[in-house]
Image (cartoon, helix red, strand yellow):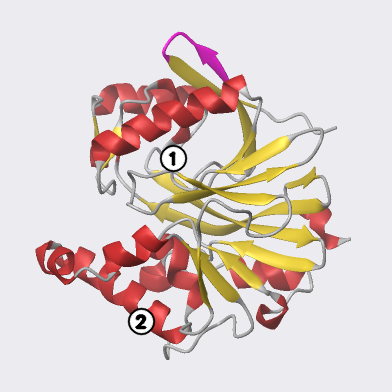
Amino acid sequence: MHSVIFPTCQIGGYQVIALSDGTMEATLDLLSGIEIAEAEGIQRNAGIEKYGRIHINCYLIRGCGRTILVDTGAGGRDNVGGQLRLKLAMLDICPDDIDTILLTHGHPDHIGGLLHENGEPVYKKAELHLHPLEIAHWQDNEKQQAASERGKRNFTLVRKTLDAYAGRICLLDESEVMQGIRPVWLPGHTPGHTGFRIHSDKKELLIWGDIVHFPHIQSSHPTVSIMFDVDPMQAEETRKKTLKQAVDEKLIIAGMHLDQAGFSCFKQSGEAYFLCKLHQE
């Protein structure tokens, strides 16, 4: 099987594969609640050479007769990412093989891969699942008018995407989207920001979306927010709660902006948390 070249985690009947869409450049001055010098030191101590480089991960879930994507990366928009479809092809998966797409939220590095340049949907046979509060946020005309120019483009992209997939959009609630996969509302980064929890008798995995963008910095300093957070205080509260849950419940964590390893677990030291290498069974 080709999948051995990608980080993979087996949870019950589901195989979860981390697929990098590439990276995006961001500067540490997007962070608030920490001095840049301290943030640089954390990155340096973690062995990260390019302090402002953020990985973009997507996750392929296969099992129970389903082929599922969680987020679709940036799709090469503004020369960011765009590697996901190549990675899928390496696994002999074409876009029409994807039957379900679970979206954590509507930022362009998560939905950019959903549309071709001509506006047509890439995944013609897939149902799109996202939180109703996420749709409401991006359809709010007042919020769009108040946004920056970049923000306005984000609103436009979400609306084009929802139009392109009209008739195949499913609203998330607290029930399982399919057996063994349950959405978890994680508000703050965006109003409908959602994680997906995959459980078996032996272990549980949480795909937590954008709980962190700079994982080493924001796990050791959970109070640190990033400019992309719609509600920084709520995002901080959600981050603290989710990090504690990750430790207390011994969750395997998958995150869109973890490094290329794709999966991690967390340990706690006082108010701080730190990433640990995942030991696969």
Classify 167 as above or below 75.
below
208 or 34, nearer to the observer: 208
**Which dot marks residue 261?**
none
- Residue 108 found in image quarter: bottom left
Badge 1 crowding class, 10 Å Cα cut-off, few under 14, some 14 to 19, many 20 or more, is many
**Would residue 254 be seen by someone viewing this image from the given angle?**
yes
Q: Bounds of the magenta span? A: 267-271
- Secondary structure at badge 1 equals loop
* Residue sitting at x 28%, y 62%: 137
Q: Is residue 52 left or right of residue 154?
A: right
The alpha-carbon separation of the residues under discs 2 and 1 comes to 26 Å
Q: Is residue 157 left or right of residue 124?
A: left
Label 2: which residue?
A: 160
Classify 243 as above or below 121.
above
28 or 207, nearer to the observer: 207
- Residue 35 is situated, as x and y percent measured from the top left of the image, at 23, 24
Label 1: which residue?
A: 211
- Secondary structure at badge 2 equals helix
**Would residue 81 be seen by someone viewing this image from the given angle?**
no
Q: Is 49 included in the stretch rendered in magenta?
A: no
- Residue 11 found in image quarter: top right
What amino acid type is highlighted by mark number 2? Lys
183 or 227, nearer to the observer: 183
- Residue 146 is situated, as x and y percent measured from the top left of the image, at 10, 63
Which quadrant holds the C terminus?
A: top right
Q: Are marks 2 and 1 in contact (CB under 8 Å)?
A: no
- Residue 221 is situated, as x and y percent measured from the top left of the image, at 37, 22
Classify 208 as above or below 18.
above
